[in-house]
Amino acid sequence: MAQPATVTELNPEQRPFYHELLRQMLLIRVFEERAGEAYAQGKIGGFCHLYIGQEAVAVGAIAALRPDDYIFASYREHAHALARGTSARAVMAELFGKVTGCSRGKGGSMHLFDVERGFMGGHAIVGSHIPLAAGAAFACKYLGTDRISVCFFGEAAANIGAFHETLNMAALWKLPAVFICENNRYGMGTALERAAAVYDIAQRACAYDMASEVVDGMDVLAVYEATRRAAQRAREESRPTLIEARTYRYMGHSMADPIHGHYRTKEELEEQKKRDPIQGLKRRLVEEGLLDDEEYAEMERRVNQEVEDALRFADESPDPDLSELYTDVYKE
Amino acid sequence: MPVLTYRDALNQALREEMQRDPNVFLMGEEVGVYQGAYKVSRGLLQEFGEHRVVDTPIAELGFAGIGVGAAMAGLRPVIEFMTWNFALLAIDEVVNSAAKMLYMSGGQIPIPIVFRGPGGAALQLAAQHSQAFEAWYAHVPGLKVVAPSTPYDAKGLLKSAIRDDNPVVFLEGEMLYNVRGEVPEEEYLIPLGVADIKRPGDDVTVICHSKTVAVALKAAEELAGEGISAEVIDLRTIRPLDTDTILKSVMKTNRCVIVEEGWPFCGVGAQVAYEIQRGAFDYLDAPIERVTGADVPMPYNKHLERAAKPAVSQVIEAAKRAAYAD
Amino acid sequence: MATKVLMEALSPTMEEGRVVEWLKAEGETVKAGDVLAEVETDKAVMELQARADGVLRKILAPAGSTVPVGDLVAVIAGPDEDISALLEQRRPATRSQEPAARTQPRAPETKVTPAPAPPAAVTGGQPERADRIKASPLARRLARERGLDLALISGSGPGGRIVKRDLERIEAARPAIPAAIPAAAYRDVPLTQMRKTIARRLVESLGPVPHFFLTVEVDMERAWDAREALNALGEEPRISINDIILKVVATALTRHPECNAWWQGDHIRYFNEVHLGMAVAIEDGLITPVLRNAERKSLREIALEARDLAERARARKLKPEEYTGSTFSVSNLGMLGIDEFTAVINPPEAGIIAVGAVTQQPVVHNGSVTVRRRMRLTMSCDHRVIDGATGARFLQTVKRMLENPLALVW
């Protein structure tokens, strides 16, 4: 198996950047925890897939992109919207189904959209957004821009036809795309080893003569660096990359799924939590003298406040008017 | 007025729209170097280059999705399916992505895309290559479904489809590509959602589209010889359905026969019949008749195949039943 | 040459008939025109005639069985002719009461809705079909708009469905339906805007036929005396009060043609002749035979004809043309002791008079209270045709004539 790349040295001049990465991961963590509570209170309906444990992937990767790049994500995408800068209010309100949500309450947890920020949605059919991301990359190239398109998907999507068809065409046509496989080891309750003949996902890029990289998905700086390299390759050479970020989800597949269930052990979960991306970055920053306890406490306080505010906002926001039922079916 | 084939009328539409708008491009299997499996894209590669006439591998799901993604990022793709039979592989992108994107994004992302290619049965291509999918796509809110019957309509409707900001499923007729008809030299558009009265009449309305228009017109000719005046309405667009034209005609004739190539169950005719009974109940003098493809997978054998397709004689019989003239 | 004897459509609305009795037996020689059997339709008992000469070889529908129109009921052929092929063609639809009865209990009993009991099963085991009229939606709408009664129209569509062309045929041949009304016998008056507005608004407020009612009390002393005097002559027929009322109404209608009219949806048809419907109660219902040209008939003629029609109505022997095409109707429940009632208009007619019993009442007459014979008439009017004052003037004429029967000879 390929060994994940890591970042060995920190640059003190990048202190505010490191703090921002930490703050975003913390925001996502708190947001997801509170969303889980709101779900239990019946304020959020339908499927709700939490991202807790995987924060380093969305935060690290998106930090490496330009504001005008396109981002496509799967249905476990609250974090990607937040990392992209969509407000906690707009995301929480969408989970609550409110008209103030980023998709006006019509999309919900699995369909967050924020076109202004190039956030092209959460998509809920496994793998079906991989060609969409390639299509946006096609458009970037067609229009002669140096924008790129990035797609996040789980390792289970690497077994579906759309993945292979798209990687083939992306490589063939040299599309400016970055495919980021968030390998959290389980497709719902099926371990990767039980679903894939080759479970070194990054190796699949060989079939399409595509650049690839394996990265520690619990290390936000490693993810950032890998994505930065891939984004540069896409932007400057118009060549796609497949990144496999090895990560882990702490929660069940969705809120309807027990936290470890029958498919994994409590011990495995506890073992993985030792690699926690937030604690990992915090420890490193503290060790290197780039973060003190007071700063961290202040960060926590602000994040809690932001999520608290988002919950209140979502709660108080109105439902979409019934007249919205028949709008947005067709573009006039 | 110049006489063109349906194929060349479509080719003109593509060429004109690609000349007009640089964001329009054509993508699909064999559209470029091969010049189109049915030669609809003949000459386009030479005129517009590989950049805008993109040959794909055989990967319907992938390139349909790439088309939708390109539309999300501001282009106006025309995705050619070599036939609609193969598009079943891509139906997830057409239905789950293209049709729903505007809605689930709360109005943020329109998908201006055309999926086009030949539908319906040709000759002796057997079960997997002979099917009409109008009803499948027309079922889906968010999609528009167009199925022209003449070169004139094909050109005007394709140009409108390309300019439409919604995903349009554009079903051509494999057996129509060689049909000739007058096509004006000057530019024209035919709005989506407007049916066309191909032959006026008083006694019975025959509703049809695509290939069955020719069947209906032939039947109308023969019915006229027997003193029954049939009004032939070509739907042209299945969704949105031109209910006004349909109801107006049925209110006049009081009788209706709906002809389609597809299967009967939950077919286009089922919806049209519903609209008629709902909107013109008090004007109906007879049960609404349907003539459809046989409710079977298409057989290979020539005689069986002929029996499985809507025939002029069936339309005549149905019209007479509706007119109580049998 | 073998001839099929089919169940024929013997009334405008007949979909099936019940064989009451075979008047010829198997093996009997028959001539074209001979009555083979009596058949009960939805309206009357009719005669099924032989259409060919030969021997009645086979009876397929025994007495008591109910057969759809068009089905084979018997075969007429040469004495030795092979008729087996004909018999094999017989549609299996012929039902006797037996199997029909057997199929009935299949419906779960709990599902039976508490509908009014159907009339005595004249059609044998098919109560739900007894008065179901099959008509296309268009035919129903046109009939509603033109004031046509679908029950009086025979359908030419599948299963007897009434379709547009049947209504067109009726409209085209309308003067011919009541065969006695020649084209010159009426005048069609287009609707004025005001008349249209009145019609529309009344329909919106009251239902398909906007009824209103006028009641008048009539002193019947002189009519009573007249009847006594006439009957004292000792000649047949004896005159009834009802005969006098029919004669008076017919005469009054000639003076008030505005009440002798049909509502036709887009116009009103005023008749110059009076075809007076007289409601007759029969064993299992009601039928309204028609006194043709009642305005031209003497009291004696009316009495004779009314008696004949009533008797034949009760025997269910009326022909369709004898109970269709009336221009106004009279319904009398006086003989049943009803003092006063309202009758429902028989569309497209515009009015009907309901006659109550003649009773002795204390009234003020010439300044003192005396006992006199009195009767109440209630006229139901279709407001689209007849306005209040119009109806009242007509009813006044009726009252005046009844109170002074000499007016009839004036």
Image: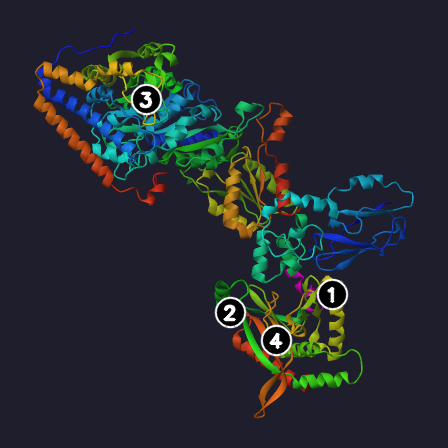
Identify the residue shown where x is 29% and y is 28%.
Answer: A120
Residue C19 is situated, as x and y percent measured from the top left of the image, at 78, 53
Tell me the element at label 2.
helix
* Chain containing the residue with disc 1: C
Q: Nearer the viewer, residue B81 or B291?
A: B291
Dot 4, crowdedness within 10 Å: few (<14), some or many (≥20)?
A: some
Q: Earlier in the sequence, mark 1 or mark 4?
A: 1
Which of discs 3 and 4 lies nearer the camera? The answer is 4
Dot 1, crowdedness within 10 Å: few (<14), some or many (≥20)?
A: some
Q: Which residue is mark 3?
A: A134
**Viewer can see residue A240:** no
- Specify start and end residues of the magenta stretch as a single range: C171-182
Residue at the bottom extreme, as displayed? C367
Residue at the right extreme, as displayed? C80
* Chain containing the residue with disc 2: C
- Tell me the amino acid under the disc marked 1: Arg
Dot 3, crowdedness within 10 Å: few (<14), some or many (≥20)?
A: many
Which disc is residue C80 wearing? none
Residue A78 is situated, as x and y percent measured from the top left of the image, at 26, 28
| Tags 4 and 2 on a common chain | yes
Which disc is residue C339 wearing? 4
In the image, residue C360 sits, relative to residue B176, either above or below, namely below
- Tell me the amino acid under the disc marked 2: Arg
Quadrant of the frame with the C terminus of chain C:
bottom right
Q: CA distance from mark 1 to mark 2?
A: 40 Å
- Tell me the amino acid under the disc marked 3: Ala
- Tell me the amino acid under the disc marked 4: Asp
Q: Which residue is mark 2?
A: C195
In the image, residue A51 sits, relative to residue C24, either above or below, namely above
Which disc is residue C314 wearing? 1
Tell me the element at label 4.
loop
Which of discs 4 and 2 lies nearer the camera? The answer is 4
